[in-house]
C-alpha cells in the first residue's frame, strides 16, 4: 500500500495525527494551506471557520503537488467545523475529483465538541462513496493521553493495511 495523507490543520491536532500515521505506515504527507489564512484565535476563529464550512466555501489553496498515480490510498485529514469537514479539503476534493475516483479513501477527523459523524457523512457524500476503507475520529488528540491516541492510530493503520 502506498498512501498519501492530505490534510488541513489549524490547531495542530490533525497535523500531529497525520505525522503519527505517516510514521507508522510510511505514507507521504501533503499539507494544504489556504491562500487567505483563517483567523486562528478567539471568536473570529469560530465565526469565520463555521460560516465558511456552512456556506460550502472552496478557498483558493497555495500551490501544491499531487501526483495521484503514485498512490493507491488517499487519507483525508481535517478538523470538524460546524459539523462539516474543513473547507480546504472541499477545495482539494473538487480540484482532484477524477483522480480520487479510483483510489481507496480513508479519513482522519479531529474535533472539539461534536459533529464528527455528520462531517464524515458529508465527506462521503462529497466523494460519492458509501464507505471509507478506514476512519479515525479523535477528540482533541493533543490533549488526550498519548497511549490512548496511539492505540486508536494503531487500529486505524491496521484497517488501512487490511485487504
Image (cartoon, rainbow, N blue to C red):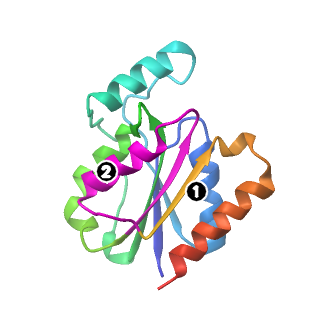
Which quadrant of the figure has residue 21? bottom right
Residue visible at 60% across and 49% down in the picture = 138
| Residue 40 x/y as whole percent | 54, 24
State the residue in front, 126 or 20: 126
Q: Is residue 133 above or below residue 31?
A: below
Residue visible at 40% across and 50% down in the picture = 120
Q: In the structure shown, which secondary structural element does the residue marked by tag 2 occupy? A: helix
Residue visible at 75% across and 44% down in the picture = 144
Q: Is residue 117 above or below residue 163?
A: above
- The answer to if 52 sits in the magenta stretch is no
Q: In the structure shown, which secondary structural element does the residue marked by tag 1 occupy? A: helix
Residue visible at 34% across and 32% down in the picture = 53
Among numbered discs 1 and 2, the one appearing first in the sequence: 1
Which quadrant of the figure has residue 23? bottom right
Query: Are discs 1 and 2 less than 8 Å apart at CB?
Result: no
Label 1 packing within 10 angstroms: few (<14), some (14-19), many (20+) = many
The residue labelled by disc 1 is 18
Of the numbered discs in the image, which one, if any, rests on residue 92? 2
Q: Is residue 82 above or below residue 15?
A: above
Q: CA distance from mark 1 to mark 2?
A: 17 Å
**Extreme residue in the left direction:** 98
Of the numbered discs in the image, which one, if any, rests on residue 103? none
- Give the total number of marks visible in the rendering: 2
Start-end of magenta stretch: 105-132
- The answer to if 131 sits in the magenta stretch is yes
46 lies left or right of 85: right
Which quadrant of the figure has residue 149? bottom right
| Residue 69 x/y as whole percent | 31, 76
Label 2 packing within 10 angstroms: few (<14), some (14-19), many (20+) = many
Amino acid at each position: 500500500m502506498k498512501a498519501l495523507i492530505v490534510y488541513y490543520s489549524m490547531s495542530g491536532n490533525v497535523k500531529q495525527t497525520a505525522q503519527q500515521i505517516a510514521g507508522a505506515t510510511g505514507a507521504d504527507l501533503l499539507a494544504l494551506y489556504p491562500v487567505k489564512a483563517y483567523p486562528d484565535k478567539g471568536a473570529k476563529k469560530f465565526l469565520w471557520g463555521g460560516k465558511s464550512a456552512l456556506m460550502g466555501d472552496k478557498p483558493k489553496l497555495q500551490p501544491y503537488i499531487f501526483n495521484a498515480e503514485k498512490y493507491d490510498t488517499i487519507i483525508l485529514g481535517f478538523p470538524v467545523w460546524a459539523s462539516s469537514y474543513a473547507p480546504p479539503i472541499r477545495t482539494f476534493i473538487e480540484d482532484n475529483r477524477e483522480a480520487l475516483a479510483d483510489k481507496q479513501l480513508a479519513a482522519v477527523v479531529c474535533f472539539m465538541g461534536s459533529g464528527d459523524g455528520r462531517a464524515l457523512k458529508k465527506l462521503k457524500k462529497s466523494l460519492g462513496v458509501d464507505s471509507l476503507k478506514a476512519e479515525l475520529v479523535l477528540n482533541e488528540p493533543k490533549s488526550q493521553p498519548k497511549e490512548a491516541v496511539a492505540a486508536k492510530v494503531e487500529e486505524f493503520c491496521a484497517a488501512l493495511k487490511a485487504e
